[in-house]
Image (cartoon, rainbow, N blue to C red):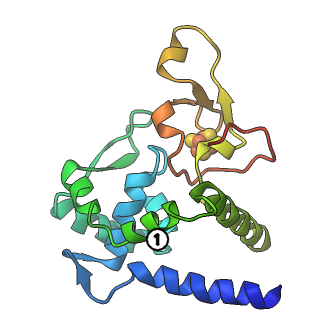
């Protein structure tokens, strides 16, 4: 069992290498790709400089430099949060979405989508691994609303047409289009969450 696990890690490391490169690719460094990728997948609560710094594993100052480079290239734009005008939200622009079409990680996404065991199963295995690692390190990973303890179904009425869910952590509606996006305030609930 341990041998197979060790082999799996060897293979995982090599698969991870498929999106790593020296120097720059299409004008962006490794960390800039990582930042742009995260911001394209994060919900509005996590498209912030501090969440980005956590995800990339860097200081706030370094993350700010990365954001500046991406803004200068027209891949990102900043705006004030609708919930709190003092907070900054980083949005990927149309130009940013276009460059993401050449993201080196895309090949890996296609390889996972083609797995015989199914992408959903593979995702669930990885989620289990991350949960084990989180428990050992007393931390939690970014994930989507579907399995989050703070997600509740919004009550009926007219608002239901606009937003089916509410986040109890942020005390805000979460739209259908946001529910599968990454959030740094995610906290796993044991069972009963809506899932795909
Ligand atoms: S329900 Fe959880 S994952 Fe979704 S926005 Fe709220 S804290 Fe984040």
Instruction: Please state the total of marks drawn on the protein image.
Output: 1
**Residue at coordinates 44% horizontally, 62% vertically from top-left?**
52
User: Pointer 1: residues within 10 angstroms few (<14), some, or many (20+)?
Assistant: some
**Residue at coordinates 55% horizontally, 16% vertically from top-left?**
160
Q: Quadrant of residue 133?
A: bottom right
Q: Quadrant of residue 141?
A: bottom right
* Label 1 secondary element: helix
Which is more toward the observer, 61 or 13? 13
Would you place residue 71 above or below residue 11 in this image? above
Q: Is mark 1 within 8 Å of ligand 1?
A: no
Residue 14 at x, y = what percent? Answer: 51, 87
**134 relative position to 39: left or right:** right
Would you place residue 43 above or below residue 112 in this image? above
Residue behind mark 1: 56
Residue 66 at x, y = what percent? Answer: 31, 70
Would you place residue 185 above or below residue 69 in this image? above
Could you tell me which quadrant the N terminus lies in?
A: bottom right
Could you tell me which quadrant the C terminus lies in?
A: top right
Residue 137 at x, y = what percent? Answer: 74, 73
Which is more toward the observer, 134 or 67? 134
């Amino acid at each position: 069992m341990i041998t197979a696990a060790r082999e799996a890690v060897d293979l995982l490391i090599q698969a991870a290498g498929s999106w790593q490169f020296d120097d720059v690719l299409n004008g962006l460094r490794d960390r800039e790709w990582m930042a742009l990728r995260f911001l394209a997948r994060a919900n509005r609560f996590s498209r912030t400089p501090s969440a980005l710094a956590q995800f990339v594993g860097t200081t706030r100052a370094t993350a700010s430099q990365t954001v500046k480079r991406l803004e200068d290239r027209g891949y990102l734009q900043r705006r004030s949060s609708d919930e709190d005008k003092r907070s900054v939200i980083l949005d990927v622009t149309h130009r940013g979405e276009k460059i993401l079409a050449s993201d080196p990680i895309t090949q890996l996404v296609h390889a996972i989508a083609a797995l015989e065991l199914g992408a959903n199963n593979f995702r669930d295995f990885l989620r289990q691994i991350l949960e084990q690692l989180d428990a050992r390190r007393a931390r939690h990973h970014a994930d989507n609303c579907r399995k989050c303890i703070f997600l509740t179904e919004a009550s009926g009425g007219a608002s239901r047409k606009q937003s089916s869910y509410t986040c109890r952590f942020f005390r805000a509606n979460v739209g259908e289009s946001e529910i599968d996006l990454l959030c740094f305030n995610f906290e796993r609930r044991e069972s009963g969450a809506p899932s795909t």
